[in-house]
Amino acid sequence: MHALQLVKYGSPADAFLYNEQAQKPKLKSKNQVLVRVKAAGVNPVEAKVASGNMNLAVSTMKLPIVLGADFSGVIEKVGSAVKDFKEGDEVFGSLQLPMFLEGTFAQYTVVDTTKASIAKKPANLSFEQAASAGIAAITAYQGIINFGKTYKKPDLHRKILIVGASGGVGSYGVQFGKAINKENSVVGICSSSNAEFVRSLGADRIVDYKDKAAYDAFTTEEKGTFDIIFDCVGGEEYFNQLDPLLKKSGVYSTAVGSMAHVGSEYVGITQVVSMAAKLVYKKLFGSHGYYFIHSLPHGEFRDKISKFFESGAVHGGITDDNNIIPLREGVRAFEKLHTHRTVGKIVLQMD
C-alpha cells in the first residue's frame, strides 16, 4: 500500500517519506476492522512527535512507522466478534493514542471497535470533512460538554469563551458551544484575519487578541460573566488574563496546559515536572474549576459525538480546498502545521 512514513526525527522534509510499497496491516483480533482510508486528519501532536520534541514520550518507537489517528473510509474486512459494522460501511473516527504503530497516513488502517472512536459516516459529510473530526472534535467535546458539565442541565444557557477559536480544536469548540446554546453565547478569541471564518462556525462575538485596546477592554468589561473558558492555545499568560472572566461556578478547561503550543520545542523532564506542578496547584488552589485534557472519551464517539454530525449541528473543520492535501505531498501538511497559523483542519487525501 501507499503510506506516509516517519523515517527519522527532524523537519518535515527530513522526517517523512512517501512509500508506495509499505506493508498492508492485517487484523490481529476478532474486534478489529480493516478500513480502506479515504482521508486522514492531521494533528499538531503528530507534527510534534515527528520533530523529535516529544521523544521522552515516544522513545520506544522503532522507525519507520506510520503516524496518524484520524480517519474516514470504507470497511473492507470485519473481525468475527464485530456486530455493529459490516463490509462496505462508510466510517469515520480516531484511533486510540498511542496510534504510532499502524496509523492512518496510509491507504489502509486497522481499527479496534472496542477501543477506538468509530462510527458510521453520516451521508451529509464528505470523507474529507469526516476525517477532520477525530482528535479535534473529541477534544472539544471533552473540554466543553464533559468538563463544562453541560450534560447535567442541558437547557441551561451558558456563556462560553473559546481561546484559539480558528484552529483545529478551537473551530470544533465553537461549533459544540453553539450546538448547545443558540443565541448570544459563544465568544471566540482569534486574529481579525480569521474572524469571518470563526463567525461562520457560529461565534456570536470575536475578540482580536492582536488589538491590545480591544482585548484589554474585553478582559475588563467581561469579568465574572463566563460559564466556560475552553483554551486551545495554552500558557500562563492567557490563564492569568482570562480566569477572572469566569463566574464563581465557572470552569476553565484547557487542551494544552501551562505551556503554550507545548511540544513545539523539546519537552524534557524539567518541563514535564513544571507543567504537572502548575496543574496540581490550579486544581487544588485555583479560584475556579480547572481541567486539563489528558485523555479522550473514545467510548462516547459512536453514541454521542457522532450524533452532532448526523444532525448537522457540527459539520467539520475544513475551511477550504487548500487544506486538503494529497498523501504523497504530506510533507506540505506538516510544514503548514509548524507555522501555528493553520485555520481549521488539514486532511490528507488518499491516492
Image: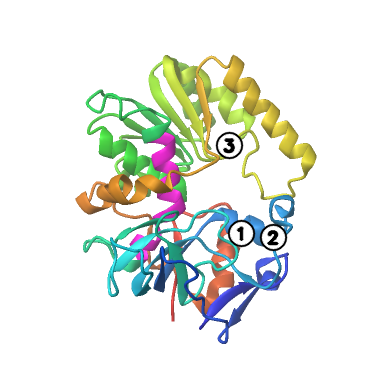
Q: Main secondary structure of the magenta part?
A: helix
User: What residue is drawn where x is 51% and y is 83%?
Assistant: 1
Which of disc 3 and disc 1 is earlier in sequence? 1
Percent position of residue 292, x then y: 54, 33
Q: CA distance from mark 1 to mark 3?
A: 17 Å
Percent position of residue 124, x then y: 22, 61
**Which three-letter amino acid code belongs to the residue tagged 3?**
Gly
Percent position of residue 208, x then y: 46, 37
From the viewer's perspective, tell me whether residue 133 is left or right of residue 124.
Answer: right
- Determine which residue is flagged by label 3: 234
Q: Is residue 305 magenta?
A: no
**Which three-letter amino acid code belongs to the residue tagged 1?**
Ala
Q: Which quadrant, please, contains the C terminus?
A: bottom left
Q: CA distance from mark 2 to mark 1?
A: 6 Å
SS of the residue under disc 3:
loop
User: What residue is drawn where x is 57% and y is 87%?
Assistant: 21
Q: Nearer the viewer, residue 189 or 135?
A: 135
**Which three-letter amino acid code belongs to the residue tagged 2?**
Ser
Percent position of residue 95, x then y: 47, 58
SS of the residue under disc 1:
helix
Q: Quick check: can you spot residue 118?
A: yes
User: What residue is drawn where x is 56% and y is 81%?
Assistant: 23
Q: CA distance from mark 3 to mark 2?
A: 20 Å
- Determine which residue is flagged by label 2: 51
Q: Nearer the viewer, residue 271 or 89?
A: 89
The quarter of the picture where residue 89 lies is: bottom left
Identify the mark at residue 47; answer none if there is no mark.
Answer: 1
From the viewer's perspective, tell me whether residue 221 is left or right of residue 74.
Answer: right
Q: Nearer the viewer, residue 63 or 246?
A: 63
Identify the mark at residue 216; answer none if there is no mark.
Answer: none
